[in-house]
Amino acid sequence: MANQKFINEAMNENHPQYSIAIHRQEDLYQRRNDLRSQFGRDYTRIIFSEAYRRLKHKTQVFFAVENDHICTRSEHVNLVESISYTIALELGLNTELTKAIAVGHDLGHAPFGHGGEKILTEIAKKHGLDKFWHEKNSLHFVDNIELLENNNHDLYNLNLTYAVRDGIISHCGEINQKYIQRRKDNIDLYNYEYAGQYNPFTYEGCVVKMSDKIAYLARDIEDALTLRILSLEDINQLKKQLNQLSSYQFHSINNGSIVNYFIHDVIENSSIEKGIGLSDEALTIMKTIMSFNYKHIYQIKRVEVHNNYVSLILNAIFEFLYDYGKKENFIEKLKEDKTNYPKLIGTYLQWLDKYALFENVSRKKEYKNKAIYNFMSDSLALEKSILDYLAGMSDIFIIQVFNELISF
């Protein structure tokens, strides 16, 4: 089926904007005899990162830590990587670039999924910070938070290429787009004001953006069925509705059949003139499934109850640490209480060691990364540090920390 119709648009050495795509903010540490391409190096830098490891314990839609078969953020990222690889390969695009964007696109997701994202936004606004949205936070994490060691055990920022960083912040899958046409200009990625403001800089980024939505459409339905939120009758009604709308007959509604349908449609209907896109029929199918999911999954009472639980946890931990910041010599106060709260205070102090600047305090010599919380000149350094600390946590760890707070 390979038609290779985008082969001349692939972001590789022959592309006129390749030098922009592979630009890094700093010189990159180079090992001898490195076999990887520029985007291949980004891929391994991301999958070696701590944020990538924590995805296995972060909610996709349903928090079900005791059920091994409920989709986690890690599984979702792997599904997006697989779908985007297949599409990019058939279209003749750079699969190493799609792989790197895909594995990095959700590193900035809050614990507890979109419910956690909503609560962090409320906390941020309350304390004078910008709205929290995970696409921008993913860029923040790969640019400023995630660190890798060199051969001397010095810690540096990931320093990814422009094309990968752009694909990460540009991936918003919440918007229904029939076609995604890449933008031609390179912009300052920190000029983004809201999710989905700009299309990706590369067609590879456009493929990942489309694949992000394809990856969760039916997978969320499977999980809802497993957790008895949906019944087989609900699924059969959806199947009947889709078959009335489509020339393609769905014999089952599961991840494999839905993903296969959309992959073929995207490959067939994408073009240089219009971009990475869908047929009219496929767009209608996508909107129908999304409408079904919102009604039967995302907006049900159980989700509201869960969000209240998430709000309690995130607000309690934020306010606990924020109260220390109001005290003189708050670092010393934290150290005094570390024995009582080893997980919470201990790991927060480690966070500050890595990323904060304090008067008359020298950073440890192994930290070669950017310091992003300047407590000497930034009046919001405390709030930023706590919000980032919370956003990086896995669901399991944040519950352990909360239980530490309420245990006597």
Image (cartoon, rainbow, N blue to C red):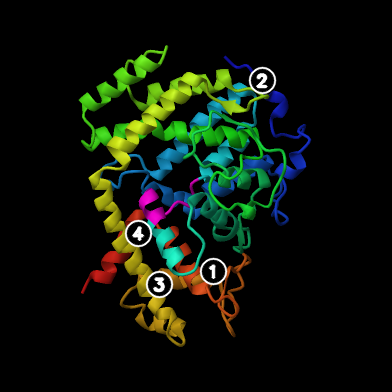
Give the Cα distance between marks 2 and 1: 46 Å
Q: Earlier in the sequence, mark 2 or mark 3?
A: 2
Q: Residue at x 54, y 26 (%)?
A: 86
Give the Cα distance between marks 1 and 4: 19 Å
Q: Residue at x 54, y 69 (%)?
A: 354
- Give the vertical position of 214 relative to 325 (above or below): above
Q: How many marks?
A: 4
Mark 2 nearby-residue class (10 Å; few <14, some 14–19, many ≥20): some
Q: Toward the viewer: 339 or 166?
A: 166
Q: Earlier in the sequence, mark 1 or mark 4?
A: 1
Q: Residue at x 51, y 42 (%)?
A: 172
Q: Which residues are magenta?
A: 106-118
Residue 5 is tagged as: 2
Instruction: Quickly name the residue at label 1.
Output: 354
- Give the vertical position of 286 relative to 106 (above or below): above
Mark 1 nearby-residue class (10 Å; few <14, some 14–19, many ≥20): many
141 displayed left or right of 392: right
Residue type, label 4: Phe
Instruction: Quickly name the residue at label 3.
Output: 346
Give the Cα distance between marks 2 and 3: 54 Å
Q: Secondary structure at mark 2?
A: loop
Q: Residue at x 67, y 24 (%)?
A: 272
Q: Where is residue 156 shown, x and y percent of the image?
A: 62, 61
Residue type, label 2: Lys
Residue type, label 1: Lys
Q: Tags 3 and 4 in contact by the CB under 8 Å rule?
A: no
